[in-house]
Image (cartoon, grey):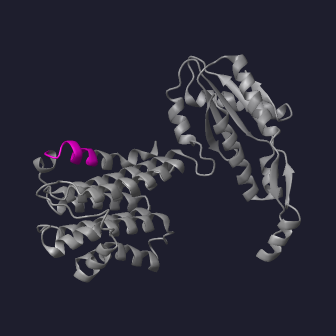
Amino acid sequence: MTFFAALPAIIWALMVCFFPEWLTSVSFSVPGTISAALGLVFLVAAFFRQWQWFYWCAWVGGIYATIQLGLQQPLAQKEVSQLYEALPVWLSVSALLLTFLKKPVLLTGKGILIFVALAILPLSLLLTPVAQTLALLSPAEVLTLPDWQQSSFAIGLLIWTVAMGGVWATYLLYKSASAFAWSHWAAWFSLMVFLLAVQYQQASTWAALAASACLLLALADQMLKLAYIDELTGLPQRRALMSQLQHLRKRSAVCMLDVDHFKKFNDRYGHEVGDQVLRLLGSILKEHGGFKAYRYGGEEFTLVFFHNDEEKLKSTLESVRSQVANYPLKLREPSRPESKIKGKEARGKKEQSKTVKVTISLGATLKEPDDTADSILKRADENLYSAKKAGRNKVVLK
């Protein structure tokens, strides 16, 4: 559901299509409104050190400034019409480059240069030669300037927006993209919709507000993930678990599990392989079903069941234990080739890997009427200790 970050852009488009009178019924302080909106995104992103959002703020701000300076005159004027035809090309090309090209860290020379360029370069469209050149890149059959006295839509521009937006959105859905990736699409889409509604007063402000709101929603999603999702395994982490346990239903159960001899495993094969084991375990727990899995910390995980059927619990836990124990984990040899050429030759001769087995121990308990989050975790942890004491690779439920 990460596409929720695009909702402000979609709502903005629906307003243009079905409720255009709303666009003129609300008055904004221009450019104060957009400065405040983008400033809020700047402040939140800076506070949490999410520098990648700065690039998109600069992109939106630069284009909005260009629109305010160049599209406030009638479209019948040649210079204005050229800018209008050039903007879709600039929006589409720059948005795709900013989305798919790797960007340096902001607080570096290259990062600052890109940030400044994103804010300033759109203003070059105000120069007639630049606008003329970009306007020529718009196919005359697809993107044409409409007669604004007879029609409120440029059919060619509408086709461009729907086609490119549809392909881009399909790609994001296929890739199960993050909210941040969806906010890129949404920011571009918001400004493209403005070009379709350019005849309405303050349409550019509505569009920039929608783009800013999309960026802010994506930033909020990122903050929640940093607070509640473990980066290594992709599972909710301890803070989310404690929140869940505060509202645990009566018929529930909790299981604590961890990797057997994990420290020795780490010491022998290295921390990278240890991380590989934790990622594998996280993947198995996510795919298994029948419970909600959390990473408690280190090599410990917690499973929350929303029923207290002991037979079903035992069967599920044994299934998890067996699946992990029987999984052939392939490890790379610790020795690495001295060069890429030698590495390629070695891979051509034989696969440089060996297989190891990993086991887990599990301790589970049913929720009791007077249980708190701490008490049920303590009891599950005691059962986990019993499973370890019984020889590891065991399930203890009591």
Residue 348: horizontal and vertical position, in percent?
85, 67
Q: Is 60 located above or below residue 318 in the figure?
A: below
Residue 156: horizontal and vertical position, in percent?
29, 59
Q: Residue at x 44, y 73 (%)?
A: 107
Residue 320: horizontal and vertical position, in percent?
74, 33
Res. 181 image quadrant: bottom left
Q: Residue furthest front?
A: 141
Quadrant for the C terminus, please. top right
Res. 129 image quadrant: bottom left
**Type of secondary structure dominating the magenta stretch:** helix
- Does 81 sit left or right of 356 as displayed? left
Residue 289: horizontal and vertical position, in percent?
64, 31
Task: Say if the magenta span includes residue 357.
Answer: no
Task: Say if the magenta span includes residue 16.
Answer: yes
Can see residue 125? yes
The magenta region covers 12-21
